[in-house]
Amino acid sequence: MPKIRIDNQEYEVPEGANLLESCLSAGLDLPYFCWHPAMGSVGACRQCAVVQYQNEEDTRGRIVMGCMTPVTEGAIFSLTGDKASGFRQAVIESLMLNHPHDCAVCAEGGECHLQDMTVMVGHRDRRYRGLKKTHRNQYLGPLVHHEMNRCITCYRCTRYYRDYAGGTDLAAMASHDHVFFGRHDEGTLQSEFAGNLVEVCPTGVFTDKTLVGQYTRKWDLQSAPSVCVGCAVGCNTVPGERYGKVKRVHNRFNAEVNGYFLCDRGRYGSGYVNSDTRLPYPGMRGAEGRFTALNHHDALAEFERLTVGRRVAGIGSPRASVEANFLLRSLVGSDSFAPGVSEQEQPSLQRATALMRSTPARVPSLADIESADAILVLGDDVTHTAPRVALALRQSVRNRAYELAADMKLQPWQDAAIRNLAQEQRSPLVSVTPGSTRLDDVAERTLHLAPGEIAEFAFAVAAALSGGDSAGNPEAAAVAQMLRDARRPLIIAGTSLCEEALLDGAAAVAGALVSREADGTRAPMLSLVVPEANSLGQALLCGDDAPDLATLTARAEAGEIETLIVLENDLYRRGTGEEIDRLLDAVTTVIVLDGMDSATCSRADLVLPAASAIESEGTVVSMEGRAQRYYPVFVPGDERHSSLYWLLCCLKAADHKHFVDINHVDEVIAACASAVPALAGIVDAAPGGSYRSHGVRIPRQPHRYSGRTAMRANISVHEPKQPQDEESPLAYSMEGLNRDEPGSLLPFVWSPGWNSNQSLHKFQDEVGGALSGGTAGARLIEAAGPTTVPEAATPSSIDAATLELIPRPAIFGSDELSARSAGVRDLMPDAYLELSVADAKTLGVEAGDGVVLGGSDTAFEVRIDPSLRRGCVAYAPGLNGCIGLVPRSGVSLSMAPDWKRRDADLIARDGQEGSLS
Amino acid sequence: MWEAIRSQLVTMWTILQHTFTRSETVQYPEEKPYLAPRYRGRIVLTCDPDGEERCVACNLCAVACPVDCIALQQATKEDGRWYPEFFRINFSRCIMCGMCEEACPTNAIQLTPDFEMCEYDRQSMVYEKEHLQIAGTGKYHDYNYYRVAGMAIAGKDKGEAKNEAPPIDVKSLMP
């Protein structure tokens, strides 16, 4: 590690770093704008100027940009010298020339990097007497608000949006001091990661539109470490709450998972917590069929009366925590506990779990995925099934560029230089899917095949890797060669197509890569995308022999089930309406524990309102097998309680021998870990409730949380005691210390002088590195097992004469909870079916026409996807109208009678605010 | 001992002298003392010279308040203005320090020379926005925040604020 001298103080800095990073890592405050730890340096803003001296004798020095200066042994710098600080002051003064007098009405105010840097530099008065230049704003969709006047032209937005996230519709326009960052035409930003602009922009040009209508300053938000439950990636988040409402979600850094960025489903998908369809009180269906509200004591008594001593079955949920599912399973017995996924999904999920546990390849974290240098995607459009993975893949294809840069002795942070050097050269990514995907623009080659064919292709690649004859399949041979040439090849497949053979095929490829090279120079990775936040945890909990919904229905019809308990699950999204009706009709009593009103709730006899993931504590297992704990951000209102509470009370009332002495969430976690060996590691996901940092709790509120004596003064002027948190190491107050805690307990980032999210580096040992308290989560699956390569399996196939219904999930709409959030709901399309050109021609339909599925009278709008494999009909599961469709079933389509085409103008005009003029 | 007696007498004499000075006590409430306009008493929310409410719900008063007795929630009007959906001051906690007035970037929150806020019921000391909002401009007559801020609102487009140039035409190539 080189030693450098800054202002006569010696520092040891990491090799190959730049000076700005080194200063920040050393705890020195050096202002900057354009540099970002995840995006490297371009030296655009000139804010991080320092003086570098040639040698000891040099007294004049010269000004260099910290972010563009590599640290070398013995280099001498000055941060505080007049020359450097005067230069920085001049730069910020000129950046502020045109900055509007907006802070009071700016959603960035109070967490603005520009405010912080201005104060840090000491600039105060605008001396320039000329006019301020102004810009017109653009409508950028329901998620991101644009206020162009505030721009300081640091170019971070376009560097993030175009270079990092691969978007194309946001750019720097015009020239000289007219530079404008926006779209060519007004309209919704097309990238699924556009929401990160809110955090990337150092000032208030891009702000969170869903926050601006109900704005709360950062210092007034109560937050706690949470985990996004929008998909299986398990991104770490920090939701902020005020007045009992979730206001916004920010990224919580996790070096191995989401890093600095979230997808828009995660960022904007928590509005369901504030939704009108939340259930406030327990309800009991009376004789006349109407619900009466109960208080929680009566509800518990009813719950016990309907459960204890009766023949009970339970249906869990892959969106509920491991602990809640475990308690329900304990209550009903493992033979009567269904994981709560569809009949088509359950075998795939179990297969994926088995393969992850047996594969000799590494099951990668997102950080591992970013390090891959050859990628084979089988089946899934990951942008829609596990969005954050797609953003990671966009980084992994850049590894070729970093290799080229290393040859040229360029440091990895030399962003512009490396992009210039590599141009369009990328690490290979091959995408084999039924139709086009959002990653096609970075793919080396794309193949469009039906699900069964993808599985066959995967086995062909595996055979080619094992030295088999691949003459018949040159594509497979080429892909095999690509993987063979890579040092860190990555195979991604998923359960979204409900094709077990495809998963086997992916595992076979990964297995063949491992067995080919035993010397360790190659580290193959196998990532299997599962659908929901806790799908993997649920599969690990239930094992292979858990009953599915059809089994439960059969048993209910045989009279073996009196009471059915449904945990946080809308069964009508897990099967056809008839199937679920049969199940619910066959049981005497239906008890539903859920946070939201749903079709299943309206069939229930007793409904217990469950707290959401943002109001409760629990553990979920992500698709890489990482167990992560989320904590309540605020105390749930009304009569809502966590599912854990309802189920534990019932278990105790039933005198269940393992649970009579259990009173604390940590004890439930320990009981779960000891009862289910596969989940033994969940105890390590986060410290227990007795953990204290420096002897005190970790505050959920920033130290300048305001309005404590007025917030609820309208209800009563007598202030109650702050809510006490008996379960976790966090406090519902500003008392305590937010420092040095493990990453899993980081409630928010703030540091003196650093009010914005850029203060994160004060929580890292090394800028951009892991959190100093340790990375959140515990991995439950580590590659170890013996090399078991799946045999070539026969993919399921349907009658060639019919069309095959293929699920193609949509980022906005396919997830149940986020679809109820304001911003996401606005972006959800109406139900549609996608057809290939050839099939549309056969049917005689065009885009915009209506078709009906054989046997039903629901009409769907036709979309034509030229890339779609012939014989496949794609639908987006979860959209209104698509609920109840059976994935991978054979269907016949016909023209819908009396279908009215939607007005083309209405489709083309992209959600304008106000009028459609 | 003589010294002690002398001291007593001097004290009595000094006090007796006060019998002939003018009384500082006034017959409150019949007689009211003069309070300067900048006296720090009951808090009001004012309107700008155009008659629109000045408060933009920036939360700076709330964060400046040392006893945390101000709570409010921002919302946006149709015309683009930010305003407080509710604005609550718990006067049973307020210490009339005036920090909120100092922090206010729009001169909306002002302290007035009225201190007569006695209530039998403490709950009545909680003032909501309808109790705080007045129709006038208070002590500062001319200031209108939106006339200096860059944000466009109905009736004030981009480039129409003080010291602002007309909006840039990004499609122009002229220097």
Image: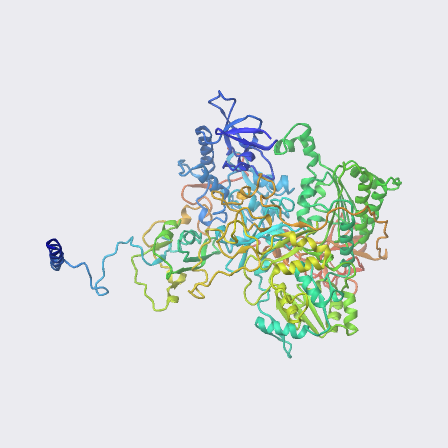
Is residue A869 visible to the viewer in this orientation of the structure?
Answer: yes
Quarter of the image with the N terminus of chain A is: top right
How many tags in the picture? 0
Return the residue nearer the eye: A878 or B51: A878
Foreground residue among A610 and A424: A610
Q: Residue furthest top?
A: A57
Image quadrant in which you'd find residue A515:
top right
Residue B13 in the image: state x and y as whole percent.
Answer: 11, 57
Q: Nearer the viewer, residue A892 or A791?
A: A791
**Which is nearer the eye, A843 or A623?**
A623
Residue A371 is left or right of residue A765, and the answer is right
Q: Residue A829, located in which quarter of the rendered image? A: bottom right
Q: Is residue A96 above or below residue A777?
A: above
Residue A619 at x, y percent in the picture: 65, 56
Work out which residue is located at the far front of the displayed protein and give it: B1
Coloring basis for residues = rainbow
- Give x and y (percent) for residue A814: 68, 56
Seen in the image, is A325 located left or right of residue A744?
right
Question: Residue A102: x and y, percent?
Answer: 45, 46
- Above or below, A440 against A904 in this view is above
Residue A142 visible here? no
Q: Quadrant of residue A240?
A: bottom right
